[in-house]
Amino acid sequence: MGEANQIAITLPDGSTRDYPYGTTAWNIARDISPRLGREALAAKIDGKPADLGLPLKQDATVEILTFDDEEGQEVYRHSTAHVMAQAVQKLFPDVQLAIGPAIANGYYYDFDTREPFVPEDLAKIEKEMKTIIKADLPFERTELSRSEALDLFEKLGQSYKIELIEDLPEDVQISIYRQGDFTDLCMGPHVPSTGRLKSVKLFNVAGAYWRGNEKNKMLQRIYGTSFPKKSLLDEYLFRLEEAKRRDHRKLGAELDLFSIQEEGPGFPFFHPKGMILRNELEKFWREEHKKQGYQEIRTPIILSRAMWEQSGHWDHYRENMYFTKIDEGDYAVKPMNCPGSILIYKNKLHSYRELPIRMGELGLVHRHELSGVLHGLMRARCFTQDDAHIFMLPSQVKDEITGVIEMEDAFYKLFGFDYHLELSTRPENSIGSDEIWELATDALREALEAKGLPYKVNEGDGAFYGPKIDFHLEDSLGRTWQCGTIQLDFTMPEKFDLTYIGEDGQRHRPVMLHRVVFGSIERFIGILTEHFAGAFPAWLAPVQVCVMPIAARHAEYARQIEKSLDEKGIRVENDTRNEKINYKIREAQAQKIPYMLVVGDREAEQGTVAVRHRSEGDQGTMPLVEFENKLLEEIRTKSY
RNA sequence: GCCGAUGUGGCUCAGGGGUAGAGCAGCGCACUCGUAAUGCGCAGGUCGUCGGUUCGAAUCCGACCAUCGGCUCCA
């Protein structure tokens, strides 16, 4: 503690300085450096986010937040959201304000309006925002009691805010922020004044349910972003454009991998080149699963209603299923592979010595997805799960979970994917006792913790028959998609009365594990396409080599090369069209073919090829054999 | 499913109440070419579907379908 009217401030680097009682983080920032003073957006006082202008009345640790900090960006975007709300309220005085948080890369605000916003409104709102920013209005925090807050928003006629206040826990300090004539319920913190916001941009309007519940009213959500410099905004917009170029739906068409047509919304058509990708992935999958002791099965697409009733799908998954009639009987198209797998298990008696039994199935499932959620290969109405069901002794659960986690990790590493894990717990509409759910959830949690893997808990998002660990991968726009999942299931074995004969000669109940690695081959191909921007590693590339004769007289030599490569199992095309070499290269580049072999007089004479790599460029001339060996090695090792 | 936007030849897009236009791709011909677009010519569309308004609809209106961005939901 410093002198009586001094307080000791500890900075993130561990140093301590004395400041007068009542100083602010802003003063401290300016004291550290004028630049930090200019860039400061908010502060963390003893680890808690706070306004820069908050008077400090006791010793504290102070961290200055700038746009370089994630939390600083959050404050910046959140403040921008308030400015947007102010602009909207000015232009459309009768709007009701809902919520307006910062999100990754931006912010949104939800409004209840009589008329939906039209795109032209965005330009007007943006313009008004700029006026507000120019006015450099200070953000002023006021703390008030619950009843004062209720009175205030009652007077302002903001019923959503009243609902929010009513739902706040008893012990929280209610605060409001004002800038100019705009008042909003808000925990804060905010930047000191609207002038701190520089480059703002609104993107689009979308409908969003109040509190994310489809039973509630649909509000108008406006998305936007903001940056402290125009160059940063431009950079961000450029990155968005780049991401769009990677979109698997666009690349899927350009590279002729797949199509989705009006005749089958949500039901992808795989073209020859897309099939090569699929087949390579499946080949790899089969090899790896064989190594890990899996057997492969295939079960029917259509099974009887009675069976779906027994499995619980009839009661818990019906909205997502397709139905049909055969003769007089009711049948359903499978939305999951597990019942089929179970029927194979049940087809004969099993000894404890056989367990674990790992049965894999590349099974095509159909699910009725709402029309509005369809998204290329990422969200389709039929897809192929690289499924497997492991039937095991209770004592084998931990090892099996660990084994699957390791396999998933190895798969994703091969492609260079980052992923994050989620543990999903019991959903509302589910089957089985609480004890069983707890047991299963604990087993999954323990496996994650034993491996020291970070994960986030996703309450109530498990399958109806058991909890799960999900592996999430990112698409080109940073949206994440669940791919791998591991689901522990004590319930299906019960429902289907699965047994094995134990050491004691008695029947016992096995435990089941459902798991996928790719998740859906279709979704995985979508993610893969965006991840590599269509430039697949050679082992996956639909065409690995394109031979390009310079002139018509080199066609014969080109054919010899084509034949040689083809005989070695390399996927090769030969571009013998009457076109200039530049033209052929341009096209092969656009098709992202890994290798181009330019052959003319020199190469024909010497039995060589001039190698060009799609990203490395001209690799020089080498004997054909040398090129073949290099490429075969690249394919064998699956490198990229 | 909900909110909003969009739908013109294989692709990208222009046009817009009087019965369709460009570039690329395709096909033909010429050029025989050395690391990202050679030139010329030809062919190709009931303007998403159905209905309405109108003398006349690709254009205006309505419904539906599909797609895109979100919400909700999910591999």
Image (cartoon, coloured by chain):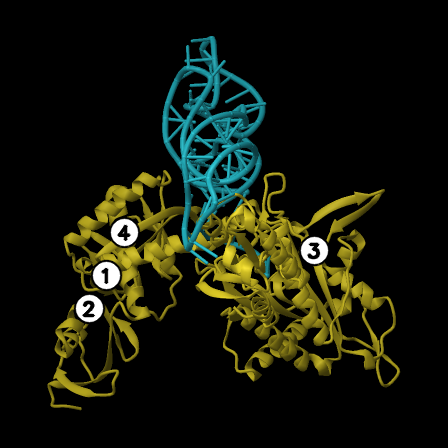
Chain colours: A yellow, B cyan
Marks 1 and 2, Cα distance to the nearest angstrom?
A: 9 Å
**At which x and y percent is residue A144?**
25, 64
Which residue lies at the image location 17% right of the left edge and 75% below the top edge? A29
Quadrant placement of the N terminus of chain A: bottom left
Does residue A15 lie above or below A276 as drawn?
A: below
- The residue labelled by disc 1 is A228
- The residue labelled by disc 3 is A364
Foreground label between 3 and 2: 3
Marks 1 and 3, Cα distance to the nearest angstrom?
A: 49 Å
Q: Earlier in the sequence, mark 1 or mark 2?
A: 2
- The residue labelled by disc 4 is A84
Q: Residues within 10 Å of mark 2 (few under 14, many from 20)?
A: some
Q: Amino acid at mark 1?
A: Pro
Does residue A605 lie above or below A435 as drawn?
A: above
Q: Amino acid at mark 3?
A: Leu
Marks 3 and 2, Cα distance to the nearest angstrom?
A: 55 Å
Q: Earlier in the sequence, mark 4 or mark 3?
A: 4
Which residue lies at the image location 55% right of the left edge and 48% below the top edge? A553
Which residue lies at the image location 73% right of the left edge and 80% below the top edge? A394
Q: Amino acid at mark 2?
A: Glu
Marks 2 and 4, Cα distance to the nearest angstrom?
A: 22 Å
Q: Earlier in the sequence, mark 3 or mark 2?
A: 2
Tell me, yes or no, whether the two marked residues, 1 and 2, touch with CB atoms within 8 Å: yes
Element carrying mark 1: loop
Q: Chain of mark 2?
A: A
Q: Chain of mark 1?
A: A
Q: Earlier in the sequence, mark 1 or mark 3?
A: 1
Judged left or right of residue A520, residue B23 is left
Element carrying mark 3: strand
Judged left or right of residue B67, residue A204 is left
Q: Residues within 10 Å of mark 4 (few under 14, many from 20)?
A: many
Element carrying mark 2: helix
